[in-house]
Image (cartoon, rainbow, N blue to C red):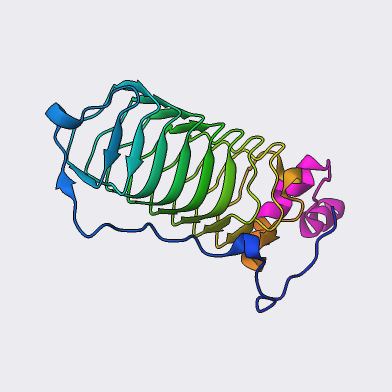
Amino acid sequence: MPVRAVRRDSGRSAAERAPVEPKRPASLDLATVEEHDLDHEATFRRLGFVDLDLSGRSADAVEFEHCRLRGTDLSGTSLDGAKFSDCLVESSNLANLRVEKSSLLRVRLSTARMTGLHWVNGSLRDVTFAQCRLDLASFRFSNFQHVVFEGCNLSRADFTNADLGGVRFTDCDLTGAQFSHAKMPGTRFVNCSLAGIGGVTSLAGAIVARADLIALSYTLAGALGIRIEDEDADRDAART
């Protein structure tokens, strides 16, 4: 796999542009569990979900538009064909949320607990994950466009067969993350922990900060069957 240096000031392609921020409504009505519980084909517009317990639910084709979720618990809930557009998700619990064939469009998620999130075969466009706990999350077969992960714990996350072209990971822990068969042209890693990642050969076309390359080199060498020797240790052994 050829490795080439990239100038920091060389500019970014259109695929690497920053995510578009959610369009915020002038006002929000306060949602309640009694009137706005999750149900099949429910549509929620311009609502604030604050400190609500929506855990353990199951619903298909739910839509959230211009909504804000703060301190809301969606842990263990299952959603199929859900749509989130122009939404803010803050300090909420999405641990073990299972979502399939769903979309995020102009969404910002910050300080959210998302351990074990299952977002499979979905689409994410103009999305920012900031300071989120995403360890053991799965994004298998999902399509990413203009997506940024900032300061996130993504240890052992699964991006198998995902299209990550142009995604940016900054200050993220990706220890043991899986990238097998992922598409990664223009994917950028800055100040990230990349130790023990799987599918390292899928990083063809990715951009890695120089400081991150040392840890990555050991994983890459292992994947290619390259044995790394310590020259000083070899000399000491030869003298004894």
Expressed as whole percent of the image width and height from the top left, the position of residue 41 reads: 35, 26
Which stretch appears magenta?
Answer: 216-240
The answer to whether 93 appears left or right of 197 in the picture is: left
Whether residue 239 appears in magenta in the rendering, the answer is yes
Expressed as whole percent of the image width and height from the top left, the position of residue 5 reads: 76, 69
Task: Answer with the quarter of the image where residue 140 lies.
Answer: top right
Does the magenta stretch mainly form a helix, a strand or a loop? helix
Number of marks in picture: 0
Which residue is depicted at the point 67% across and 35% down? 161
Expressed as whole percent of the image width and height from the top left, the position of residue 101 reads: 51, 30
**Front one among 227 and 105:** 105
Which residue is depicted at the point 66% across and 79% down? 9
The answer to whether 84 appears left or right of 235 in the picture is: left
Expressed as whole percent of the image width and height from the top left, the position of residue 174 reads: 54, 47
**Front one among 115 and 38:** 38
Q: In this view, does 53 lie above or below 20?
A: above
**Front one among 47 and 79:** 47
Q: Is residue 4 above or below residue 118?
A: below
Whether residue 238 appears in magenta in the rendering, the answer is yes
Task: Answer with the quarter of the image where residue 192 lies.
Answer: bottom right
The answer to whether 135 appears left or right of 144 in the picture is: left
Which residue is depicted at the point 81% across and 58% down? 231
Which residue is depicted at the point 57% across and 65% down? 17
